[in-house]
């Protein structure tokens, strides 16, 4: 068993955690209802490669392994993410490539009576652009990872299901450490409710983390991802072997193209 802290109300967290979280609240103009702490040792245990990747991959569909269009779209994302200056035309190409990947992933995921959780910013932007986020039913909480004592805090705004769902779809951008998704699953996951996670890219470490959490929490989780690479930086961001960005910061790249972007 990997010892994981449970989410707690921000007001009940230790003062040092409250201070770290409030700095992010002020920076982004949001309010966290809960925070969850991932220590450095817990993250190391969640991410470690110890021979169980076959079990991880049994519950994952990696589209780039069988879909040439996904491979081409990922190349576009990498190219634009690594440009020194982002242009409006480049952002539009990037957004179009992202949408193409997600459309090809969504056809693989059952849509019967599901509730979507699409965290701000990129999850919500993409889900809205593809018509899978319904007002009053689905959720778009703020979820931010916060560096803390060599590990991470994840702060989440209000995130409570409005009705019982037959399945959950977590619609996110790129999976790096897996900490944000694990925090959301702590808040909404149930052992009797199948869960699908949809993401353009995942670090293998993050997939290991989610798999280990699923086994430990007895959750049924399947991951649908455009492409997978190995490697996390010391700050728990996904990095490729060449240290190039793989998809970059999705939110920063696509937010200026939407009406919801606030300058």
Image (cartoon, rainbow, N blue to C red):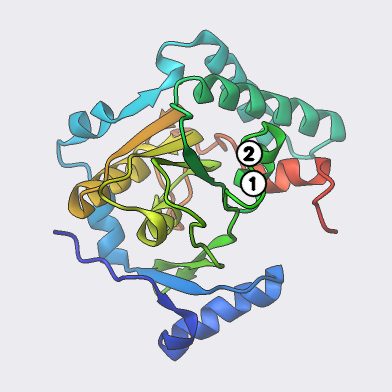
Which residue appears at 51% of the width and 62% of the height? Answer: 159
Which residue appears at 27% of the width and 29% of the height? Answer: 57
Point out the image quarter for the C terminus: bottom right
Could you classify mark 2 by the number of other residues whose Cα lies within 10 Å: few (under 14), some (14-19), or many (20 or more)? many
Residue 14 shows in the view:
yes
Which residue appears at 67% of the width and 49% of the height? Answer: 135
Viewer-proximal residue, 218 or 263?
218
Question: Is disc 2 placed on a helix, strand or loop?
Answer: helix
Point out the image quarter for the N terminus: bottom left
Viewer-proximal residue, 85 or 25?
25
Image location (x, y in percent) of residue 108 = 45, 21
Q: Is residue 29 left or right of residue 189?
A: right
Q: Is residue 97 left or right of residue 159?
A: right
Viewer-proximal residue, 170 or 255?
170
Residue 124 badge: 1
The residue that label 2 is drawn on is: 127
Question: Is disc 1 placed on a helix, strand or loop?
Answer: helix
Image location (x, y in percent) of residue 229 = 41, 32
Q: Is residue 186 above or below residue 80?
A: below
Image location (x, y in percent) of residue 176 = 44, 46
Image location (x, y in percent) of residue 202 = 44, 37
Which residue appears at 20% of the width and 66% of the height? Answer: 3
How many circles with numbers are drawn on the protein?
2
Residue 193 badge: none
Residue 82 shows in the view:
no
Q: Could you tell me if the residues under marks 1 and 2 are in contact, i.e. CB atoms within 8 Å?
A: yes
Viewer-proximal residue, 156 or 194?
194
């Amino acid at each position: 068993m990997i010892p994981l802290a449970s989410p707690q109300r921000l007001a009940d967290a230790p003062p040092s955690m409250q201070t770290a979280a409030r700095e992010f609240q002020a920076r982004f103009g949001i309010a966290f209802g809960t925070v969850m702490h991932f220590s450095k040792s817990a993250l190391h245990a969640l991410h470690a490669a110890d021979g169980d990747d076959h079990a991880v991959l049994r519950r994952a569909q990696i589209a780039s392994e069988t879909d040439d269009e996904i491979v081409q779209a990922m190349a576009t994302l990498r190219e634009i993410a690594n440009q020194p200056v982002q242009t409006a035309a480049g952002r539009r190409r990037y957004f179009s490539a992202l949408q193409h990947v997600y459309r090809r992933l969504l056809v693989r995921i059952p849509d019967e009576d599901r509730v979507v959780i699409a965290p701000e910013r990129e999850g919500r932007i993409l889900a809205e652009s593809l018509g899978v986020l319904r007002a009053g039913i689905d959720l778009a909480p703020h979820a931010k990872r916060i560096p803390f004592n060599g590990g991470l805090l994840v702060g989440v705004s209000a995130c409570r299901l409005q009705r019982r769902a037959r399945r959950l779809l977590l619609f996110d951008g790129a999976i790096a450490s897996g900490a944000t998704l694990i925090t959301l699953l702590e808040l909404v996951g149930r052992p009797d409710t199948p869960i699908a996670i949809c993401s353009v890219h995942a670090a293998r470490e993050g997939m290991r983390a989610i798999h280990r959490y699923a086994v430990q929490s007895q959750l049924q989780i399947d991951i649908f991802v455009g492409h997978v690479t190995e490697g996390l930086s010391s700050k728990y961001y996904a990095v490729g072997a060449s240290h190039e960005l793989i998809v970059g910061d999705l939110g920063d790249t696509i937010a200026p193209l939407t009406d919801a972007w606030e300058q």
